[in-house]
Amino acid sequence: MKKLIALFLFALLAGCAKEPPFDPIEKFREAEEKMQKFRYEDARKAYQEIQEKAPDRSYDADIMLRIADTYYGEEKYAEALVEYQAFINFHPVHRDASYAQFQIGMCSFQELTSIDRDPAVTRAALKEFQSLLVKYPGSPYEEEAKKYVAICKERLAEYELYVGRFYYKKGSYLAALGRLEPLLKDYPGSRFEPDILYYIGLSHQEQGNKAKALSAFQALAAKYPEWAKEANVLIDKLKAP
């Protein structure tokens, strides 16, 4: 029996001795090939294997970033966001930090749904894109970030208009104004501004505030010629004795 055990141990040790040493560089190359084939889960396992078997590379910037990219590629945006944020926490001045910050914004942006849903995700995306512009001025992602900032602001303006119009139709004119009037200051020049002015005017009119209603309709007629005819009809009615 002892002889059999000894032979078994010898065979086991011999098998272990034949196992080639772990090569993190080769494993990274293998992971990159899987990424190129969109095999994100397999690629992530390979990157994580490097972190486990080569502890000195656990927080390697390239590996951390690529793990985040695998989650993003799989549309697992919550997990990707956590990994991109971890990258920035460990490598705030890395050459790819601006990319990670941009991707954090995109993780929220990709979760946007219909305009009648809670705009918290839109606000989160806007905050992250604005953060990129402040923290990494002149980055390769600056112009893209500005584009998404504009999109997020438009969506927020549209949401507030949606809510304001809902209150107006309900007859809650004060609540409607509480939603609509700040939009002129918060989102100046929005493509929804004509509708905002229109419903501001109507809400003031319903409340019997002719002066403020006139101001809104006159601004609508002056700034948006395509609305002038309808606005002037409302203005004439308000001015009629």
Image (spheres, rainbow, N blue to C red):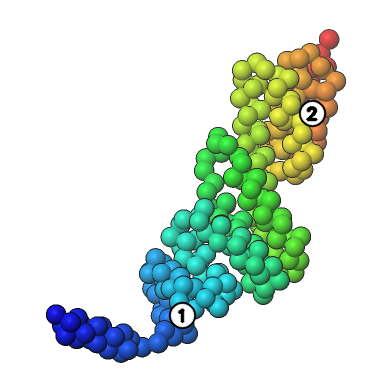
Q: Position of residue 204 (x, y in %)?
A: 77, 20
Query: Where is 119 relative to 90, above or below?
Result: above
Quick one: which residue is furthest to the top in this view?
Answer: 241
Where's residue 232, x and y in %?
76, 26
Asked whether the viewer can see residue 47, the reply is no
Residue 201 as seen in the image, left or right of residue 67: right
Q: Is residue 67 visible?
A: yes
Within-10-Å neighbours for mark 2: few <14, some 14–19, many 20+:
many
Q: Which residue is mark 1?
A: 28
Where residue 132 appears, as percent x and y from the top left, is 70, 60
Q: Quadrant of the C terminus?
A: top right
Q: Nearer the viewer, residue 105 or 31?
A: 31
Give me the disc on residue 76: none
Q: Which disc number belongs to residue 216? A: 2
Quadrant occupied by the N terminus? bottom left
Find residue 154 and report its horizontal and vertical position in percent.
66, 45
Q: Which residue corresponds to the image point at 41% horizontal and 69% vertical from the top-left?
A: 45
Q: Quadrant of residue 195?
A: top right
